Amino acid sequence: MTDPIYQTDALITEDIDAYLEKHQHKTMLRFITCGSVDDGKSTLIGRLLYDSKMIFEDQLAALENDSKRVGTQGQDIDFALLVDGLAAEREQGITIDVAYRFFSTESRKFIVADCPGHEQYTRNMVTGASTADLACILIDARKGVLVQTKRHSFLCHQLGIKNLVLAVNKMDLIDYDQAKYDAIIADYRAFAESIGIEGFTAIPISGLAGDNITSKSDNTAWYDGPTLMDHLESVEVRLDENMARPFRMPVQWVNRPNLDFRGFSGLIASGRVKPGDTVRSLPSGKTSTVKSVVTMAGDLDEAVAGQSVTITLDDEIDCSRGDVLAAADSPPEVADQFESTLVWMDEAPLVVGRAYWMKLGTQMVSVTVSEPKYEINVNTMQHLAAKTLNLNSIGVSEITTDRQIVFEPYTENRALGGFILIDKISNRTVGAGMLHFSLRRAQNVHWQAVDITRDDHAAMKNQKPRVLWFTGLSGSGKSTIANEVEKKLAIMNRHTFLLDGDNVRHGLNKDLGFTESDRIENIRRIGEVAKLMTDAGLIVLTAFISPFRADRQLVRDMMGEGEFIEIHVDTPLDVAEARDVKGLYRKAREGKLKNFTGIDSPYEEPEDPEIRVNTVSMSPEEAADHIISQILPLK
Amino acid sequence: MTLTHLQRLEAESIHIMREVVSEAEKPVMLYSIGKDSAVMLHLAKKAFYPSPPPFPLLHVDTTWKFQEMYALRERSAEEAGMELLVHQNPEAQELGINPFDHGPLHTDMWKTQGLKQALDKYGFDAAFGGARRDEEKSRAKERIFSFRTSTHGWDPKAQRPELWNLYNAKKKKGESIRVFPLSNWTELDIWQYIHLENIEIVPLYFSAVRPTFEYEGGLFMADDIDRLEKVMGRRPEITERSIRFRTLGCFPLTGAVESEAATLPEIIQEMLLTTTSERQGRVIDKDGGDASMEKKKQEGYF
């Protein structure tokens, strides 16, 4: 074992002030290590921590003790034990989650994401790679380039990591054989080029023996490149590249301590900004001039990518959380339809057509994902046909947002091109994506500026537009009650329209069947039509079973605040089945009708509907009166 | 211009705090008066300047903190223009729970249960804490946004992936988030930043001649000798020594170190030359063996 070369700096004892001055100017590099199960990642990280003096004596004593007790290195120190954290993992002897480690040298602080190599943990690797400037891909010199090596390299490349280090580990176990090393490099190069990786740095190392980690190894005299540590200390930090790009700052928070101050707070994603610069607020497109760049330490002459600041403007322009302040002469694009790479991270697969939340920068919008164009086999890089994406799969899909968002392709700007998807019911982070480009459809269909606004339409009809969304089991009485309500509204001189199975299924939606995706699309279209009708000022009544909460939520999200009124026509299954007006329950019971709600397909009751009517205790007319009383006043 | 590591850490912490304020309904900052809390509070002031931080400070008090800590607590809250909430578990108060007679129960009742009570009482849905990933092994895998069930439980398998700087703060009613804006700071970063930004910390971090006594092999400070006598059943033998603290908690649980370091550079110098890790002075990690912090987290300890 070699001695740590990052011995205590003499300055610490001799001139602590000089030492502090020096260490206050360190830069920071974030990187990830990835490799297969036994490639020695944890050992390498333990070694980096050990060699940079980040291990204290008491930890070392514990480590020596643990090494003898549960280590895999006989009487020697098992560095892997330093970094294996959670109890469950220690028992299994593997790492199963992303762990972040810290060490620093004289010129840099490092944050290492330790990423597991298991096939089922693509999710963790993508997470670790998302914040990394560099990826260190480990190869076991005895095994060479494995399927997992390819997968890790591919994912790092997808996540936009340009600095790839191929650390050929366990060189001691192949007797530091240059020919074997060269063969591995040639093999890897061929693969890297085939997937578009532009370059990589290969280093022969031994994490266990310490070769070429912090000091050049005599065992690899034939190698004339940098040591791993030299390379980590000298490689360019990604943030610095971002400074050369045009200015962008997603607005996080509007700072308004009093009437005289209105500042926009955010983390600068790219470029620079200084007082006097003309900036554009997107998506509105309004421009103004930067008045000041405010921080608690005083106003700045200039701020750069990576800084958190508060900007004040000369004009009172409308700008709030989710908007992006950008260089006025080169603003980012605004669109609502995109092609995107998508990594699925949840046990429950992607549901095509279902609405998810998308968080991109500080923007939170509702989105739907189309059927994947293809899924990518991460082992062979082949494109496969796919109907959906499952946990740990990666594919390319079109994504539609419910309103225009500000974005840039991920390859140009991670902050405006990377996003997460959140399930609206479970609130879990279910996917992550990288936008490629906006689709022409969205770009070319500009919103027609209309002189007669929806408010004008509503005012002419002397009513507030609304959607009365009746949901309930088949035979619960939705259409009957909706019909009653519409008649009563007509008597009150209101302008209404009733959408039900008869006028929708036979026309607009006659191309749709009864698969899950089709059912979602059916509801989505009804929602869109209802939305157009509310734009025209109408009170729209819809009568569809609409059994799934997520789908009803999707429609709710399309409508303005307070315009969507969910009415649960609450009829117990046995009552609805006993009525069986259309004889459908009998058919379903006989197995002649599949996926019938209430029989072999669930009905998810509304948890908190605006109105609930009980058809056992109320007649249709009473129910209609109750509904009208709940939606008054109509203006 | 290349940003230094401290500038980047600062910008990241500020970004995290602004996200929480924008997306949570009722955030609070847990304030323990230690050096990490001091840095966290300083960053909060920066994040929202010229507004005061738009959330209160909450101190979950055990009644066993050092007097100098209580003094700084009041002053810091006032200077920041923030409301200070102090919660003391009434049950622990009534039972007279103390570190000498009750061992681990002291931490459980005053801190773990006290914290849950306070969060429930005020209905906070997001709580900033000053924990760092470098402190302890199981912390290295902690998310920046850490989700707790409505009973404040922590399930390592149910934590959400965190990509880029996109934090998912969506949650159901009753669930809450612990947020750790200092996740990526190390002990050295904290000290350097305190030095650079001239942040006020409890004087106990600096060496001075103080009354001390030895207890079960550790060196402790006699902060309130009468009270100590009452719970220990004897008056400990006091020796005046030049000591300081590397970490601050309850005075009978926090070991002192003999030291001459009286300025920040001297403290940093001592820290860099020292050979034992920060938490060693704290008794808490030792109960329950190897995975003790993880176990405490599952039970709801911060």
Image: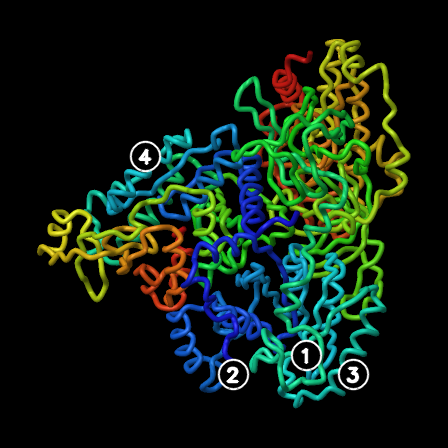
The local crowd at label 1, few if under 14, some if 14 to 19, many if 20 or more residues have their Cα within 10 Å, is: many
Task: Give x and y (percent) for residue A397.
Answer: 81, 51
Q: Earlier in the sequence, mark 3 or mark 1?
A: 3
Q: Is residue B231 above or below residue A510?
A: below
- Position of A560 compared to A47: left or right? right
Asked if both marks, 2 and 4, belong to the same chain, the answer given is no
Q: Residue at x 56, y 72 (%)?
A: A42
Asked if both marks, 2 and 3, belong to the same chain, the answer given is yes
Asked if both marks, 2 and 1, belong to the same chain, the answer given is yes
Task: Please state which amino acid type lies under the numbered disc 4.
Answer: Glu
Give me the disc on residue A204: 1
Residue that numbered label 3 is attached to:
A183
- Position of A531 compared to B111: left or right? right
Proximity of marks 2 and 3: CB atoms separated by less than 8 Å: no
Q: Residue at x 42, y 33 (%)?
A: B56
- Whether residue A88 is visible to the viewer of this picture, yes or no, is yes
Chain of the residue where label 1 is placed in the rendered structure: A
Residue that numbered label 2 is attached to:
A1
Task: Please state which amino acid type lies under the numbered disc 1.
Answer: Pro
Task: Give x and y (percent) for residue B203.
Answer: 30, 46
- Whether residue A359 is visible to the viewer of this picture, yes or no, is no
Task: Please state which amino acid type lies under the numbered disc 2.
Answer: Met
Q: Residue at x 64, y 52 (%)?
A: B163
- Position of A130 compared to B106: left or right? right
Residue nearest the viewer, comparing A220 with A577:
A220
Residue that numbered label 4 is attached to:
B74
Asked if both marks, 4 and 1, belong to the same chain, the answer given is no
Residue nearest the viewer, comparing A239 with A425:
A239
